[in-house]
Image: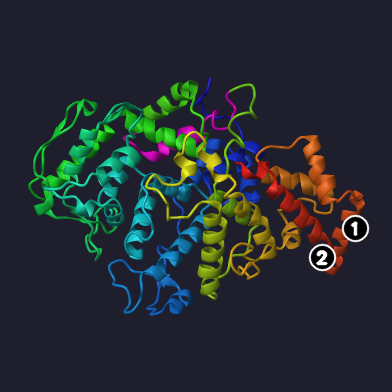
Amino acid sequence: MASLQPLSGALGRRRAAHLLRRTSYRYTRATVDQMSGQTASTVLDALLKLYQQTQDQPYYDNPTTASDIEKTPWILPPGLPLPPNTQDFMLRRPLIAWWLNEAYNDPGIGHKMQFFFHQYNIVAANTRTSAVFFDYLALLRWGALGNFKKLASRIIWDNDMLAYLNNNENTANNPNENFAREFFELFTIGKGPQIAPGDYTNYTEDDIVQAARVFTGLRTLGNRTNIDPETGIPRGTLNLNQHDKGAKTFSAKFQGQTIAGGNNAAGVDAELAAFVDMVFAQPETARTTVRRLYRYFVSRNITSEIENDIIEPLSVIFRNSDYEMVPVLRALLESQHFYDADDSVNTDEIVGGMIKSPLELSMQAMSFFNLPIPDPATNPQTFYTRFWSQTVLDRMLGGAGMPLFQPTDVAGYPGYYQEPEYSRQWFNSSTIIARYKLPAILLTGTYQIGSNPNASIGTRLNLAPWVRNSGNISNPSDPKTLVEELLWYMLPEEVDNDRFNYFYYTVFLDNLPPADWTYEWQNYLTTNDATEVTIALQRLVSAIMYSPEYQTL
């Protein structure tokens, strides 16, 4: 029986590592060690908080050319126009680079949840201006650990979303159904299996028609001067002349509810609120969102047992909290089931049961080895362009099938929605090269992929100093300890003896006596010449990162 009962006692290393891998893009041994002596409840007190960003937003200081943008810090104060002669497309990639850097430094779940809501409230970074895309990211951050119902009501007014789903074309005389369809299918309740033509489990095609009428007249506002009083974020506007002021009657899926049409701005606000209330009054809205959270954090497999013992009770928690995110996240991530501790075999289902997304794969590798990130203050061009944009965004993510904030489909990224494989979508013949180039990119400090593969990425992973640094490996001169500890923290489960011996004797020692490593390590400490120890360390780390086990979390 799957159990939502809270896990008791200290987490220990294995479960602490599992929790951190699943909830944060920032994965370090120090954090795992700190968490391992704490209970899941205590750890979640810290994880379930928004990270205080290093910059409230990216910024630039009056650049006029692409070169200037790369060389200066990048801020765009809300409401201010772009500098003269600046082409907006130049700003999109630095903005995504900024988001990546903030996600890399976030020790908790905030950016992971921000990306969860991006997946199910998808837009592309080039839909409108870069400033408007920043507003969209800010809105997802605002709602990431807040109230889902409030976020859904605010996404209706988001300038990027209104443009991406063509609601600027939604008029009383000629309704456009795109926004309404996705609000049902992707944002909230989900359609469920089709029952008959135009009839789905949770709504009908006619419900989409009625919802489109609710959204008529909602428009983007390019100058960003209409500020939402609760979020403080710019929002769209209402063209009342284009709004359908008639009553909207929904199907039996929504108990035949009729929503009065608004005749003025206040009336339209009330109409939208009534519509959101109607959708969130349906129990299936909570269930659909909980299933998505389960597949995002736990497993792609939802059996009848999971549906009854995990999804349904979590949905009740969600509804009873009026759709607050933290109670349902806490119940899931504190549960015995999340740690595979609710049956007699605790190594068969959850831990190591998902494929890392390219974002998790790259971020967690860089943070684990504390890769030195170029300084944006002294070298912004390397920071924004060469490292985050051309290396991480293009090669580590785009090359591995994750074009960040440029999804190819309104449904988002296949690894999160494509049944029945879900996360297995991340690992296939078209993505494997980029995934397996990751250790070479880090260890050589070069692009490896695409044009100019030998060009510098602006940083490099030097393993010998990292191993030497106190806290990373407890006793580097002992080869067995070194291999054990790297395997403990880099792989989701402990390996058996045969697998350990492969990494230890065949890969690391290269079938030489263990004393040879101890001698070379002591020589490195004496001479500071890391040549020999680096060869062995790179061989070991590369083999671990190539292993099937490392591709999972």
Specify the quadrant of the image occupied by residue 226: bottom left
> Which residue was labeled with disc 1?
519
On residue 531, the disc is: 2
Q: Nearer the viewer, residue 489 or 298?
A: 298
Q: Is residue 518 above or below residue 36?
A: below
The answer, for residue 43, to whether it is visible in the render is no
Asked whether the residues under the numbered discs 2 and 1 touch, taking CB atoms below 8 Å apart as contact, a structural biologist would say: no
- Looking at the rendered structure, the secondary structure element under dot 2 is helix
Residue 505 x/y as whole percent: 85, 46
Identified by mark 2, the residue type is Thr
The structure residue drawn at horizontal position 57% and vertical position 29%, both measured from the top left corner, is 8
Q: Nearer the viewer, residue 139 or 328?
A: 139
The answer, for residue 22, to whether it is visible in the render is yes
| Number of callouts | 2
Q: Nearer the viewer, mark 2 or mark 1?
A: 2
Q: Earlier in the sequence, mark 2 or mark 1?
A: 1
Q: CA distance from mark 2 to mark 1?
A: 13 Å
Is residue 281 left or right of 42 when viewed as pictured?
left
Stretch of the chain drawn in magenta: 321-342
- Looking at the rendered structure, the secondary structure element under dot 1 is helix
Residue 327 x/y as whole percent: 41, 36
Q: Nearer the viewer, residue 488 or 443?
A: 443
